[in-house]
Amino acid sequence: MTNPQIQTTPVAWDQLNIKVRFGSLLFDILLDGNIYPMKIVSNKKHNHAVIEMQFIDSGIGTLVMKDREHHLESGSIHIIGQHIFHSFKPDPIVPGERSTIRFTFQEVPTLDPGFPQEEAEQIKAALSRLTYCQLTDSIRNRAMFRMLAEIRSEIESPSVGSYTKVLSLFAQIIIELVRAIQTERNTSGTYTMPHKERYDQWSPQIDLFFTNCQQELTLEMLAARLNLSTKQTQRLLKKYFNTSFKDKLMNTRVEVAKDLLRTSGLSIERIAGDVGYSSTQYFCYLFQQKTGMTPSDYRSLELSGNTAQSST
């Protein structure tokens, strides 16, 4: 729903540059004033070099295609493939209205490394052989009508994130279309969600490992956790965390110590032991190296800062 406090301005629909990407497929969304419901009127046979989606907003009518007639009724959605000749005929008793969006798609040379290529290939296969399809799932159709209305609203009254939201809505419409085509052809088959790369699986394991910083942790222990050699583990830490095992352990311990100094009344000796150092002197040395101040100075600074804030 459009925010009543936001003023809408006329939209040059045919000038909008809206492109949606699915991996190696780039979709160009082509709009005009017919994104709003317009009366179904008689016209001559014609075709387009685009895929055309007809949303029947109200009433009834007829779509003529390849000398066959397809009934149009309120709430239905009809898809016409590229280069397919067609025409429309209104109903003289219950005239209808239709909204239209069109799009083309092409393969682009640069791949999206995070997008499963198999999905892009399935989308391409469904749309490449498209001549005509009527979407018959009423629940799906209602959702797509809502998405189209939301697209109009976002473009009429844009604010931060509107372009991203519009791309997402068009992407959802295209996916619903592809699913409908697969259902009609009985070609949906199986689908597997993509799995994380090995690093994506390692990262949370590394994070969890260092939460036990009060223990005597070693590089060998982390390597065993990751099922890697110590050299591979060191390279992994350097590549993705830009640090060594020793430095990551020290940084983690210092950060935990800072929290304890700031929020507890524990002695510095106790804090040193709680973060894994048996020598308080060595802990103080590392803490000062990392922060530029002793643990006592850090605690005093934090306490004085909190006191000043509470008194204002």
Image: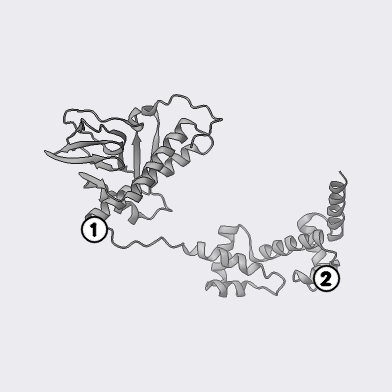
Q: Of the residues shown, which amino acid type is indicated by label 1? A: Asn
Looking at the image, the residue that sits furthest to the front is: 93
Q: Which mark is residue 270?
A: 2
Q: Earlier in the sequence, mark 2 or mark 1?
A: 1
Q: Of the residues shown, which amino acid type is indicated by label 2? A: Arg
190 or 244: nearer the eye?
190
Q: Tell whether 201 sits left or right of 186.
A: right
10 Å crowding of disc 2: few (<14), some (14-19), many (20+): some
Q: Tell whether 48 sits left or right of 67.
A: right
Residue 272 place in picture, x, y as percent: 80, 69
Q: Tell whether 59 sits left or right of 149.
A: left
Residue visible at 63% across and 59% down?
A: 243
Residue 129 place in picture, x, y as percent: 21, 47
- Does residue 235 appear in this view? no
Q: Which residue is mark 1?
A: 186
Marks 2 and 1 sit apart, C-alpha to C-alpha, by 68 Å
Residue 24 place in picture, x, y as percent: 35, 48
- Does residue 134 appear in this view? yes
Residue visible at 51% across and 61% down?
A: 200
Looking at the image, the residue that sits furthest to the left is: 67
